[in-house]
Image (spheres, grey):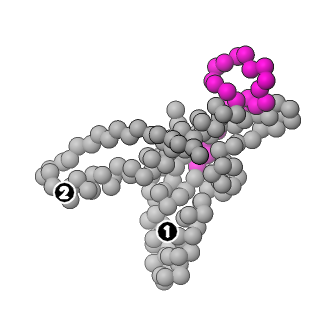
Amino acid sequence: MLEISIPIHINFTVDGEFTIVNLVEKIRDLELEKEVLGQFVMKLNEVVTTELCGEKYVHDKKEASYERAGNYYRKIITLLGESELKIDKIRDLSSKKIFKPLLEILGIEPYKNCQDDIVFAGIDIATKSSYRDTVLYNEKFLKKTVITFYH
């Protein structure tokens, strides 16, 4: 079992009247679900990399099987919208092969930006809506802003 704690600090201002409607609108505009997803993935990436490679900047790794091999940025699209993640690459010292364990753990396929949750939602929408409504919904959803998550 893996337990990850993510501290969240929220700062926002409410313009105009301080009502529950304005407060709910501001909270929705913060896109907290995206922020939680990004913070969780960053922390999980750190935990997995440290587990495989040991602590960062430690040079005495006599029994190491893996080493850090840089990182790269990966765009994914989920029901929460489009996110760009910074993911560590790991090198197996015996075979010299480079892999990305976080992608394997999360089930993110190489070269596939749209994840299964959005595919299933699209299928559900398409079966319940007309073609025109489905196209409008997808256009509106895919125009959301990109949030980047990296150190």
| Type of amino acid under label 1 | Asn
Task: Name the residue at the front extreme.
Answer: 1
Left or right, residue 28 beside residue 47: left
Q: Position of residue 84 (x, y in %)?
A: 54, 46
Left or right, residue 111 beside residue 44: right
Classify mark 1: helix, strand or loop.
Answer: helix
Q: Nearer the viewer, residue 4 or 68?
A: 4
Mark 2 surroundings: few (<14), some (14-19) or many (≥20) residues within 10 A: few
Residue drawn at x 76%, y 31% is: 66
Residue drawn at x 70%, y 34% is: 52
Q: Which mark is residue 20?
A: 2
Q: Nearer the viewer, mark 2 or mark 1?
A: 2
Q: Which mark is residue 73?
A: none
Q: Position of residue 4 (x, y in %)?
A: 51, 41
Q: Position of residue 108 (x, y in %)?
A: 65, 53
Residue drawn at x 66%, y 18% is: 58
Is residue 128 shown in magenta?
Answer: no
First along the sequence among labels 2 and 1: 2
Q: Label 1, on which residue? A: 138
Mark 1 surroundings: few (<14), some (14-19) or many (≥20) residues within 10 A: few
Alpha carbon of mark 2 to alpha carbon of mark 1: how far?
30 Å
Classify mark 2: helix, strand or loop.
Answer: helix
6 w.r.t. 112: above or below: above
